[in-house]
């Protein structure tokens, strides 16, 4: 018996040693791929391009240090400020790999908004997490970029929640922007929530997917866009929207994991702390902003803008439903408006097979309209 106990203890000891070693290796690797720096922009010979900009920095915006990634081949190019979705879901780790070509034509700025990603802090007052504050933050970031690069105006692009924030910003501060580009444009989000639930539930019934049916019936259908338990409901509904192609069209659910989660681990522009805080920021922000978005609908608050707008929308989008966005843009007044349909995309445009079309719109259409 004593001999058996010794063997068990020895096995346990070596198991703990191996486990501790693996944890140490993972931490070393995680730190190595988290320097909090961005690669310089180089030419074909590996030399840094003269007049280029490539930096990661914190800028004080309305009393809070907020995180920016600024990249462009020439400081003479126009500035493109990208507003991420969520709310609370920065997309720079997705944007940078696919948008290198935009850096040849724009100074591309990815900003982690208040309370999100590398801009998250447990010290941020909950009362500061208001839509008005986010609009004012966007304006202050815009002012910083204009002064930094000597521009009279910049371009503004928003995806999903960022498209809501973008429209609210150009409505309040139209003189700051050449044009606005909306992707997965928010419109009447209450109606979108109702329609997206109906979309997944009808698909589940058609396939007799008992797992999906039971999960969806457990959360119940929304009433005027609102669920009894919003946090749980959004998670469950989102899982089945992805499954049925309303998030990324023509791809498996695993594809969204590949483009959204995995790149975060190797994203060198984030320090390790930002990666560890990412989900905290997402939860914190959504909890405080989602109901505000539902209560302050764009269809009620923004019916005319004085900035040219370009809306890029996947026809299969069932997060910000395509038909609702199209109806909203048809009615809105603007000096110029274009609604551009992406036939093979859903909500996560342009992270799919139509990214070339997305780049063409930004380079060959938007820029040429202002040259």
Image (cartoon, grey):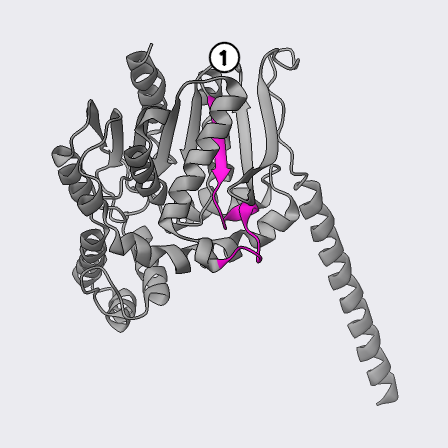
SS at mark 1 in the image: loop
Q: Find the residue positioned furthest to the bottom.
A: 1
Quadrant of the snapshot with the N terminus? bottom right
Q: Is residue 183 magenta?
A: no
Quarter holding residue 16:
bottom right
Along the viewing direction, whichever of 103 and 55 lies nearer the viewer: 55
Residue 152 rendering spot, x and y as whole percentages: 41, 18
Q: Where does the C terminus fall, quadrant-wise?
A: top left
Rendered residue at 30%/52% (across/down): 293
Relative vertical location of residue 371 with respect to residue 141 in this rendering, above or below: above
Q: Position of residue 206 (x, y in %)?
A: 16, 59
Taking depth in this image into account, of 193 and 261 the one nearest to the observer is 193
338 lies above or below 243: above
Is residue 95 among the parts visible in the rendering? no
How crowded pointer 1 is (Cα within 10 Å; few <14, some 14-19, many 20+) is rated as some
- Looking at the picture, tell me which residue is in the foreground, 174 or 158: 174
The residue carrying mark 1 is 76
Magenta span = 107-125
């Amino acid at each position: 018996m004593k001999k058996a106990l010794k063997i068990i203890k020895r096995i346990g000891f070596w198991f703990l040693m191996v486990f501790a070693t693996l944890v140490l290796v993972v931490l070393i690797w995680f730190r190595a791929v988290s320097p909090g720096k961005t690669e310089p922009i180089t030419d074909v010979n590996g030399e840094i391009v003269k007049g280029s900009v490539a930096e990661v920095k914190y800028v004080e915006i309305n009393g809070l240090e907020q995180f920016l990634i600024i990249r462009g081949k020439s400081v003479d190019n126009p500035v493109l400020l990208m507003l991420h979705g969520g709310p609370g879901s920065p997309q720079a780790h997705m944007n940078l790999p696919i948008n290198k070509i935009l850096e040849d034509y724009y100074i591309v700025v990815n900003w982690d908004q208040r309370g999100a990603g590398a801009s998250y802090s447990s010290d941020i007052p909950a009362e500061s997490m208001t839509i008005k504050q986010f609009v004012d933050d966007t304006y202050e970031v815009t002012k910083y970029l204009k002064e930094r690069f000597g521009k009279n105006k910049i371009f503004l692009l928003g995806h999903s929640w960022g498209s809501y924030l973008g429209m609210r910003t150009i409505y309040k501060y139209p003189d700051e922007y050449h044009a606005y580009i909306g992707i997965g444009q928010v419109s009447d989000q209450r109606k979108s929530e109702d329609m997206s639930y109906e979309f997944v539930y009808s698909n589940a019934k058609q396939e007799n997917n008992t797992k999906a049916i039971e999960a969806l019936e457990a959360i119940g259908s929304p009433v005027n866009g609102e669920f009894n338990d919003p946090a749980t409901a959004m998670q469950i509904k989102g899982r089945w929207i992805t499954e049925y192609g309303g998030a990324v069209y023509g791809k498996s659910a695993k594809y969204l994991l590949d483009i959204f989660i995995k790149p975060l681990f190797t994203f060198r522009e984030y320090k390790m702390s930002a990666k560890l805080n990412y989900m905290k920021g997402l939860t914190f922000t959504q909890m405080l902003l989602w109901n505000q978005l539902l209560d302050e609908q764009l269809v009620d608050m923004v019916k005319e803008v004085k900035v040219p707008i370009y809306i890029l929308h996947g026809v299969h989008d069932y997060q910000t439903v395509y038909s609702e966005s199209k109806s909203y843009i048809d009615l809105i007044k603007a000096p110029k408006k274009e609604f551009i349909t992406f036939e093979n995309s859903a909500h996560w445009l342009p992270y799919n097979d139509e990214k070339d079309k997305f780049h063409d719109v930004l380079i060959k259409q938007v820029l040429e309209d202002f040259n």
